[in-house]
Amino acid sequence: MENPAPRRGARAAGTHGEAGTHGTVEREHGATADAPAAGTQSAAAHPGGGRRLLSAKVVWPVIAALGFGCYTIWIDHTGGSSGGHAALLGLIAAVVTGALGLVLVHFQHTMITDTRALAYGALFGASMGWLYNLSGPSVLKSSGWGLVMGAVMFVVSLYIFRGHRVREPHGLHRNRKQHTHGHGHGTPHGAH
């Protein structure tokens, strides 16, 4: 058996078939002998690791904000506003929705599923209601449209978030059957 080189702060795994002890570096558990020192990260060891995740957290809200800004420009300009006014309004709309989207994406991991879906629904509903109001209808009609669109986004977000098991601040999201399985008499795990 090959003896991997020790990492900083860890001992190498045992040789000749010895069982590893606490604090050892073992290949079968995902540790590598040539891992970089703590605090440094190479692209070869983690191809696209942190950078890809970070860019997705930034790219999608920015794309959505640019689309929202362009649609705002189109609606305002076709409504009779000058090109400069429509462009300024579109820029403001893109910046505001982009900033709110980035904040929401950044803090979504700290929210439970229902709150996260509600936040996405509120942002989408407010945006769609404002766009609808920009095209001419009354504030009451636009508010109703925003509530409908926000409710649709809430349901879709809740379906997506519940369909994918996600780590939440209080642990993994589990359905009721998995939570009470194996504890007898249907009592939840925490009640024992």
Image (tube, rainbow, N blue to C red):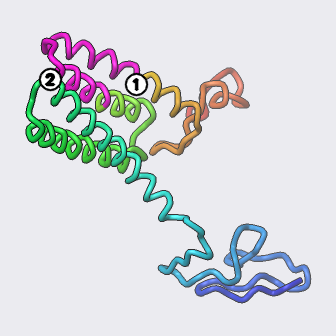
Q: Residue at x 34, y 20 (%)?
A: 149
Label 1, secondary structure: give it: helix
Which of 48 and 15 lies nearest the eye of the viewer?
48
Q: Residue at x 64, y 83 (%)?
A: 10
* Residue 114 numbered mark, or none: none
Quadrant where the C terminus sits is top right
Circle 2: residue type = Gly
The magenta region covers 124-152
Q: Which residue is mark 1?
A: 154
Which of 167 and 184 lies nearest the eye of the viewer?
167
Q: Tell me if 164 is positioned left or right of 157 in this view.
A: right
Residue 157: image x %, image y %? 45, 29
Q: Tell me if 49 is positioned left or right of 147 in this view.
A: right
Does residue 55 lie above or below 27 as drawn? above
Residue 167: image x %, image y %? 53, 45
Magenta-colored stretch includes residue 137: yes
Label 2, secondary structure: give it: loop
If you read the primary sequence from the N terminus, does the residue marked by circle 1 or circle 2 appear first? 2
Task: Kindly report the distance in space between the C-alpha atoms of the residues bearing marks 1 and 2.
Answer: 30 Å
Q: Quadrant of residue 150?
A: top left
Which of 8 and 142 lies nearest the eye of the viewer?
142
Residue 65: image x %, image y %? 30, 42
| Disc nearest the viewer among 1 and 2 | 2
Residue 192 in view, yes or no: no
Magenta-colored stretch includes residue 86: no
